[in-house]
Amino acid sequence: MKPFDYVRPATIAEAVTAAAQPGATYLAAGTNLLDLMKGGVSRPDRLVDVTRLKGLDRIEHLADGSVRIGALVRNADLAHDMAFAKAYPAVAEALLSGASAQLRNAATVGGNLLQRTRCAYFYDPASRCNRREAGSGCDAHGGENRLHAVLGWSEGCIATHPSDFCVPLVALDAIVEIEGRSGRRELPLDELHRLPGAAPERETALEPGDLIVALRLPAVARDFAGHARYLKVRERTSYAFAVVSAAAALRIENGKISDARLALGGVAAKPWRARAAEAALKSVTPDAASFRAAAQAALADAKPSGDNAFKIELARRIVVRALTLAAAGTPARIPALPASPFASGALHA
Amino acid sequence: MTHSISLTVNGARRDFQLDDPRVTLLDLLRERLQLTGTKKGCDRGQCGACTILVDGRRINSCLALAISHDGADILTIEGVARGDQLHPVQAAFIAHDGFQCGFCTPGQIMSAIGMMREAQAGDDPERIRECMSGNLCRCGAYAGIVDAVLEVQTHEASQRRSA
């Protein structure tokens, strides 16, 4: 690991100033960053430790019905917050389907949003990667790419975003609060992560020094609590990243879908909101034909980036099953195997 | 620049001078305190062999910078027995053959102790397997590990009922 300086600012303003310097990066739990530093993928000159900043570790259920989650709230604490899990069950299920219990105990909400791709070529400094080093090329093209993107990819990069948490969040219109050199601003989570285009090295909309301080879910996101699921196909039952995942949330009134939210994970460089599918579900009966039509709409623009054509059909089926499970109703308790298609009840949905 | 930190390790306060901020909690325990029960397996947060409790919560010590945990209360495998009396999870691992080579065992036991404090799994074997999925065992002693954890969970539940 390359040597670095370590600073622990006392205030958010000091942190922003310190992290705006070239070569500086924020450290929270470090569950992704330290791994990347050990592999020589990230080589910061200075770590700005934000773990002691005050007031960023709270879950606030606000009077207007929205919830505000401090960026330093640990993944496990959010998933196990009873009021949160009841109001946003698909988000809790996604959190509990990610990583391991040890990692969820450490990893922060803000860090989860900013975790880097798990593309093996990004992780290997001996490989060419436009995301890691601008303009160097992409060894994933023509390489081992069966797990790579099928939506929104470019010639320069076919990596996917690995977060589970972000998938239901983007479906539920989460807002990110950012403190930067010019003060506080807000951004829809859907606009935080960038598609690679011609500049894969620009992964997010953040500027130097920008610090995510909180995440908010609007009050309306609670209206889906009765019909909200996250479903995730992995190459093993637990402790694995998604091959494909989907968050589905419905409002059903008088036997019709009055509002639908759908997002996919593991398919693109960002959590993928499927707005065309949502529109197709509006005012229709929640049945197999409607769900298949929505799945077709969600993947209409998909194309393989390598040996991964199977992911397109897999994603359609995951969308259908996630919608089917959501329509059946949120279970009273998160299943023993969170988000697993092999959990009891999910297998034959 | 030298950084001073203090930790409570298995109940005793320890002060350290770090001349390099790169040291992880795992390396600090093993190389500065000679507490080698906590194992370095993958060193990348994938195997769970380095699991310890920090402020009562199980984490991967290989992915935790010591300097960032100044003031923390740490429990390692060396701190769970009371003298010659094994922790109930340690005793259950022996009773149920919850290991073969033993390398992953300290991490498995610390993870199981952390899991019990989290109180999410109860006596459901499927939930126990899920909650222990961050600890790999290359010998494949998983059946014994789950039996061991299940026995302790069941025993503690029955004690709570009779209390």
Image: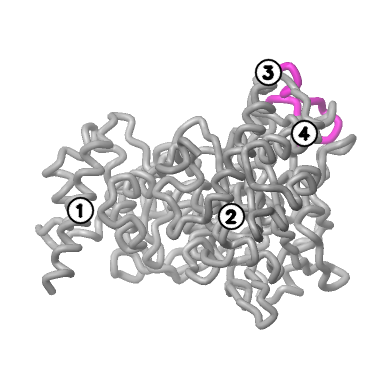
Q: CA distance from mark 4 to mark 3?
A: 14 Å
Distance between the Cα atoms at labels 2 and 3?
Answer: 32 Å
Residue under numbered circle 1: B89
Q: Choose between A262 and A47: the one closer to the eye.
A: A262
Q: Amino acid at mark 2?
A: Ala
Mark 1 secondary-structure assignment: helix
Is there a contact, CB below 8 Å, between mark 1 and mark 3? no
* Residue underneath mark 2: A228
Contact? badges 1 and 2 (CB < 8 Å): no
Residue bearing mark 3: A307
Residue lying furthest front = A254
Q: For the residues carrying marks 2 and 3, which lies nearer the camera in this image? A: 2
**Kind of residue indicated by mark 4:** Leu
Q: Quadrant of the C terminus of chain B?
A: bottom left
Q: Which numbered disc flags the more N-terminal residue, 2 or 4?
A: 4
Work out whether disc 1 and disc 3 sit on a shared chain: no
The amino acid pointed to by label 3 is Asp
Q: Which residue is mark 4?
A: A151
**Mark 1 is on which residue type?**
Val
Mark 3 element type = loop
Q: Residues within 10 Å of mark 3 (few under 14, many from 20)?
A: some
Q: Residue A160: where, in percent of width, then height?
A: 70, 37
Give the percent coordinates (x, y) of residue B81. Answer: 18, 59
Picture quadrant where residue A41 is located:
top right
Tell me which segment is drawn in magenta: A126-143
Q: How busy is the neighbourhood of tag 4: few (under 14 within 10 Å), some, or many (20 plus)?
A: many
| Mark 3 chain | A
Viewer-side residue, A140 vs A265: A265
